[in-house]
Amino acid sequence: PEIASHGSDLYRVFRYDENGSHQGNSGDLYMQKSDDNGKTWQVKMPVFVDNATDNRNATFGIIGDKFIIFFRKYIVNFCFIVLKYTHY
């Protein structure tokens, strides 16, 4: 997972597939927050969920109160890069 800090909190973004598969078009991106320097993490929150593509290789940063997230959307023989920002 990719990890960034904001104040005293840590955030991580990662790919998660409910089927446990590394391949296929079912991976989605989630975020978790830790307020104890990574010892424990809160319940994962969906960042980008799309049942038709595999979303992976996320990287992100925090600017002010915005999370800027880049990731790769993968469809079997086609891929493109997506930029998304979310206000939490």
Image: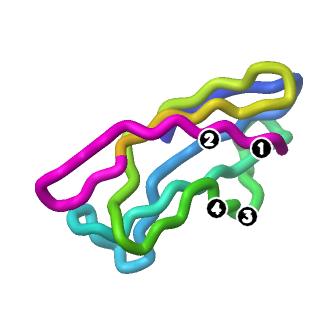
In the rendered image, which quarter is residue 35 located in? Answer: top right
Separation of residues labelled 4 and 3 (CA atoms): 10 Å
Q: Which residue is mark 1?
A: 34
Mark 3 residue element: loop
Q: Which of 56 and 78 lies nearest the eye of the viewer?
A: 78
Q: Are marks 1 and 4 in contact (CB under 8 Å)?
A: no
Residue 15 at x, y percent in the picture: 45, 54
Which amino acid, by three-letter code, is at mark 4?
Pro
Q: Earlier in the sequence, mark 1 or mark 4?
A: 1
Q: Are marks 1 and 3 in contact (CB under 8 Å)?
A: no
Q: Is residue 68 visible?
A: yes
In the rendered image, which quarter is residue 9 located in? Answer: top right
Decide whether the magenta segment is chiefly helix, strand or loop.
Answer: strand
Q: Earlier in the sequence, mark 2 or mark 3?
A: 2
Q: Earlier in the sequence, mark 2 or mark 4?
A: 2
Q: Are marks 1 and 2 in contact (CB under 8 Å)?
A: yes
Q: Which of 63 and 9 lies nearest the eye of the viewer?
A: 63
Residue located 84% across and 44% down the image: 88
Q: Which residue is mark 3?
A: 43
Q: Which residue is mark 2?
A: 12
Separation of residues labelled 1 and 3 (CA atoms): 10 Å
